[in-house]
Image (cartoon, rainbow, N blue to C red):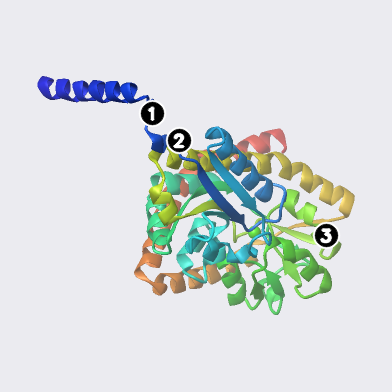
């Protein structure tokens, strides 16, 4: 053992001497410049989603002292928002910042890696992805499309959406044309609504023109910026469809596999930090934004009642059965997600939920 260690150490010393002798201080590969074209599904400078993606790109350049350069393209600047996936899977661009549920038409498993109805909150999602087998399943799904994706932001619990009438039962959803992507849209379809998936930058014009009757987007900070209140006054909570939407930094898998461990760690760490920073920003700004919407814009805040939530639950179960029947991988993702939801959710009930209920009751919050 000792001898082997000696040989190894001696080997390093001799290699070091050789490098010193030839003047090569460090292996050339560690100095390789890396260029990344990064497309996104968000409008440029859009608060939270867009600024978060742009902040992450800058962080990557900073962390590598400028060695890794990212040229960032907001939605429509290089390809349309929903073409981001093909742009990266094909290798035309190296990376995207997006919500992976936009790709559910390619495989329903993608929905789980943003958010699904009755899904996971931010803290629960982090637990599943990092310690519940979520990342491994994400790798398996994404890998089959030539993508490697990591966590890169979260909006937290989203609002239920904007309606131009009160929604008191599932009957009130019938015939409603609503912008709501992901499996949440499928739940709405089960209840008789017509879901459409539109990128953020196209929602306002469709709502104002009457092409859609209702929309969900994110939460008070983002929705107020979009001025949806000009066309719909009833603002419902909580959204069953996106309880903790995780954003994703998706990279071309072949590009990713050729990077050094050092560069992979920089990219992953910068994205993971954005996952945290973006959530902090939403939590910091949503409360004041909601108060302003109510006070300054006359927005009518409404809570979905138990009856409609029960209808959402029944419809969601039907949607999940269809997802499970899609393929063995879809079923495997669903079962892993359900297991984490049961374990982490039960703990949250004892910890976060119970504590917040008592704290806010005592303080009158
Ligand atoms: Ca949304």
Give the SS element for disc 2. helix
Instruction: Give yes or no for contact between labels 1 and 2 (Cβ–Cβ under 8 Å).
Output: yes
Residue underneath mark 3: 229
Q: What is the residue that sits farthest to the front in this orientation?
A: 22
Residue underneath mark 2: 31
- Front residue of this view, candidates 116 and 360: 116
For image coordinates 52% across by 71% down, the residue present is 105
Q: Residue 44 placed where, x, y %?
A: 71, 52
Could you tell whether 33 is left or right of 234 in the image? Answer: left
For image coordinates 37% across by 58% down, the residue present is 140
Res 223 → quadrant: bottom right
Cα–Cα gap, marks 3 and 1: 58 Å
Q: Residue 265 placed where, x, y %?
A: 44, 39
Residue underneath mark 1: 26
Res 23 → quadrant: top left
Q: Which of marks 1 and 2 is nearer the N terminus?
A: 1
- Front residue of this view, candidates 172 and 67: 67
- Front residue of this view, candidates 61 and 190: 61
What is the quadrant of the C terminus in the image? top right
Res 229 → quadrant: bottom right
Give the SS element for disc 1. loop
């Amino acid at each position: 053992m000792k001898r082997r260690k000696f040989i190894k150490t001696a080997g390093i010393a001799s290699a070091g001497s050789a490098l010193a002798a030839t003047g090569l201080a460090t292996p050339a590969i560690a100095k390789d410049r890396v260029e990344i074209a990064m497309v996104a599904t968000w409008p440029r400078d859009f608060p939270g989603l867009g600024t978060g993606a742009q902040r992450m790109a800058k962080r990557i350049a900073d962390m590598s002292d400028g060695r890794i350069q990212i040229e960032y393209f907001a939605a429509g600047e290089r390809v349309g928002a929903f073409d981001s996936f093909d742009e990266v899977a094909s290798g035309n661009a190296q990376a995207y910042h997006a919500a992976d549920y936009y790709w559910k038409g390619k495989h329903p498993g993608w929905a789980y890696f943003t958010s699904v109805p009755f899904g996971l909150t931010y803290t629960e999602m982090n637990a599943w992805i990092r310690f519940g087998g979520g990342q491994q399943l994400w790798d398996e799904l994404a890998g089959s499309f030539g993508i490697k994706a990591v966590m890169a932001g979260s909006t937290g619990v989203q609002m239920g959406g904007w309606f131009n009438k009160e929604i008191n039962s599932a009957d009130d959803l019938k015939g409603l044309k609503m912008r709501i992507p992901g499996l949440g849209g499928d739940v709405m379809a089960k209840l008789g609504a017509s879901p459409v998936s539109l990128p953020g930058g196209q929602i306002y014009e469709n709502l104002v023109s009457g092409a859609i009757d209702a929309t969900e987007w994110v939460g008070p900070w983002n929705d107020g910026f979009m001025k949806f209140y000009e066309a719909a006054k009833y603002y419902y909570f909580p959204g069953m469809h996106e309880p903790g939407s995780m954003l994703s930094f998706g990279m071309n898998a072949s590009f990713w596999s050729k990077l050094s461990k050092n560069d992979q760690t920089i990219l992953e760490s910068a994205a993971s930090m954005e996952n945290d920073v973006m959530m902090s920003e939403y939590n910091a700004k949503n409360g004041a934004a909601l108060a302003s919407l109510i006070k300054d814009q006359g927005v009518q805040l409404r809570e979905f009642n138990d009856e409609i939530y029960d209808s959402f639950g029944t419809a969601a179960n039907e949607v999940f059965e269809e997802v499970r029947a899609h393929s063995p991988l879809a079923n495997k993702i669903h079962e892993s997600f359900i297991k984490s939801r049961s374990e982490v959710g039960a703990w949250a009930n004892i910890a976060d939920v119970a504590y917040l209920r008592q704290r806010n009751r005592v303080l009158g919050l």
